Amino acid sequence: MVSFSVYSQSCATENTSFKYGERVDYTIYYHLAGVWVGAGEVFFKVDSLNLKGQEFYHFNSEGITFKKYDWVYKVRDHYETYMNKETMKPLRFKRKVNEGGTHIREDYIFNYPKEIAYTLRQMEEEEPFVKDTVELPDCSYDVLSMIYVARNLDYSNLEKGDKIPIKIFLDNESNDSYIEFLGRENLKIKNVGEFRCIVFSPLLIEGTIFNAGDGMTVYVTDDQNRVPLLIETPILVGSIKARVSKMDGLRFPLTSKIGD
């Protein structure tokens, strides 16, 4: 059994899974009246930013519900993160959220040497922005950068039930969380193919969509890309799943794919 503490000793991460130009698209399904309904879409994209001769990762993600399903739970979300290429630590995180009538605007600047984050937040559409300076424990990641960091974790020696501790900076504070390894399975995605997958479950932080606690299950390709293929989770108004629909600009061949 791999101990929990082994993974708390260092957060140094090297990118071995993605590259500039990668884009992965998903269809979002709601569980309505006992049926899964395609009700929205989301994409994740990796771009580059050159600032004063230094290159950074620029992650973009946008999620929306289709208009005919806005009556169930309207979502118009936009997330951005700028990450240091060498340390894989985020430098800036921006979030613009409209979920079920909740409006949130956030802009975080991370200063790891000083262990502080400068935050600018608006929690209601008509309210003023509020500035703050809060503690930033080392190895803290925003929700978008954590997705890409998780793709580069070492799952090779884990056994079912092992947990990798992580820190998520969300809602103006760092939260202790973990990723639980659930094993390996084959997964068939309609119109995409069948893949060998690594399966894990992140401990959820309570927010505008999610309840706190376990419940999310993530399937990623068991190859060098570690592309998330399927995410299943309960939400405040039922259940959703995000199923991959398109993958472009991957760094490596999809050797986890079974058959053609």
Image (cartoon, rainbow, N blue to C red):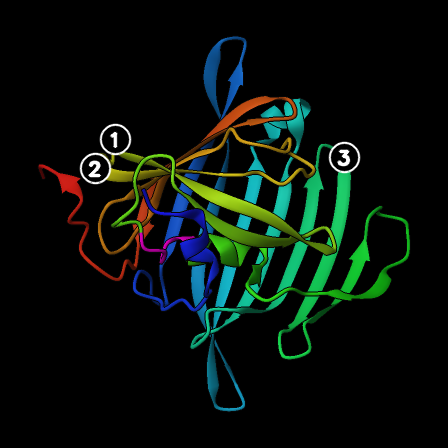
**Taking 240 as reference, is 198 left or right?**
left
Vertical arrangement, residue 98 with respect to residue 73, above or below: below
Given residues 167 and 96, the one toward you in this image is 167
Residue name at image x 30 percent, y 65 percent? 16
Q: Mark 1 or 3 closer to N-term?
A: 3
Choose top left, top right, bottom left or bottom right for residue 158: top left
Q: For the point 69% across and 65% down, which residue is it?
A: 108
Residue 47 place in picture, x, y as percent: 44, 67
| Residue 124 vs residue 141, the one in the foreground | 141
Label 3 Cα crowd, 10 Å radius (few <14 / some 14-19 / many 20+): some
Q: Residue furthest left?
A: 259
Residue 88 pos. (x, y %): 46, 69
SS category of the residue bearing label 2: strand
Closest to the camera, between mark 1 and mark 3, is: 1
Amino acid type at mark 1: Leu
Task: Say what amino acid the circle numbered 2 marks.
Answer: Phe
- Give the magenta range: 150-154
Marks 1 and 2 close (CB-CB < 8 Å): yes
What residue is pinned by disc 3? 101
Residue 67, placed above or below residue 45 = above
What residue did someone put label 1 on? 187
